[in-house]
Amino acid sequence: MTATEHTIVLFVGVGVLLVIATAIGIVLDRRSRARGVISPTIENLNARIRAWWVMVAFMGVAVLLGGIAIIVLMAICSFLALREMLTLIQTRSADHFVLAGVFFIVLPAQYVLIAIDWYGLYSIFIPVYAFLVAPIIAVLRGDTTRFLERISETQWSMMICIYCVSHVPAIMMLPIPGYEGRQFLLVAFLVIVVQSSDVLQYVWGKLFGRHKIAPSLSPSKTVEGFVGGVASATALGAALWWITPFSVFHAGLLAFIICLMGFCGGLVMSAIKRDLGVKDWGSLIEGHGGILDRLDSVIFAAPIFFHVTRYWWTP
């Protein structure tokens, strides 16, 4: 099959799953209302399904427009995620120059470097140069109040919202022999597996969850949900080997790794929200909170997936 045929089959498959999920959600909602009960769980499920329709539609448009459109889409996601995070942390007037530089210099520069495929620079631009320059600019303003806390939050925001997210479109630049022109399918593999793991953990947890895995961080996550969700998403990843340059075994192994990283990413981002005293990062996406609420697992999985694939499958 050609790359176009693979993409069509993939989107048709996702569309069919969403149609089935939508139908199930409607049936469950009608049954609940017929009993005179409005279930928050069912309402949340339907909100998530509607949000998935919107996200898949955006991704489909980006695919039709080409690789640059995907880079622009992820750059916009980085911008929105950065705004969500920096809105919740405490800043001072002395930080304004640094924040302006992060939004309007660091962020676009990172994505331009990816667009021109300058791996030697985009791989170190933020963790080396931006990481060091940001505190230099901040300290020149002369405000030392909570300096370490303020600059650390800025540096962390750059790493999470720009550097890690930018590894999603960077996957399209991987020069994998015999896989030219198909790299978008690797992006699809990453997103489908990691996001499916989140959904399946939610479903397994609702059906069989008994033991809380991290009650102080995310009360809804259970051991049963984690095991069932990761196992199911790993199997899904293995089943999607045909859209990747991997064997069935390697596709399953990579799926397992990124599912674990996604789960850990969700816990880390939940810990930050608890520290900041908020439930969601924002309210942009119905049923999902903000951009960061939807990207939290992808944020931690994308760099690992990129570098493992680059190390083992590129010359």
Image (spheres, helix red, strand yellow):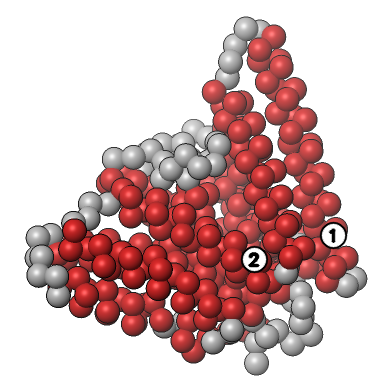
Q: Is residue 40 above or below residue 311?
A: above
Dot 2 or dot 1, earlier in sequence: 1
Disc 2 marks a residue whose amino acid type is Ile
Quadrant of res 213? top left
Answer few, some or many: residues within 10 Å of disc 2's Cα (few below 14, many 20 plus, some between 14 and 19): many
Closer mark to the observer between disc 2 and disc 1: 2
Query: Residue 51: x, y in percent?
Result: 62, 41
Query: Residue 261: x, y in percent?
Result: 50, 61
Q: Residue at x 58, y 84 (%)?
A: 117
Q: Quadrant of the N terminus?
A: bottom right
Label 1 secondary element: helix
Which residue was labeled with disc 2?
70
Q: Is 197 on the left-hand or right-hand side of 100? A: right
Tell me the tag on residue 106. Answer: none
Work out whether residue 254 or residue 148 is closer to the camera in this orientation and state it: 148
Disc 1 marks a residue whose amino acid type is Ile
Q: CA distance from mark 2 to mark 1?
A: 17 Å
Which residue was labeled with disc 1?
8
Work out whether residue 65 or residue 203 is closer to the camera in this orientation and state it: 65
Q: Would residue 98 be visible to someone looking at this image?
A: yes
Query: Residue 119: x, y in percent?
Result: 53, 86
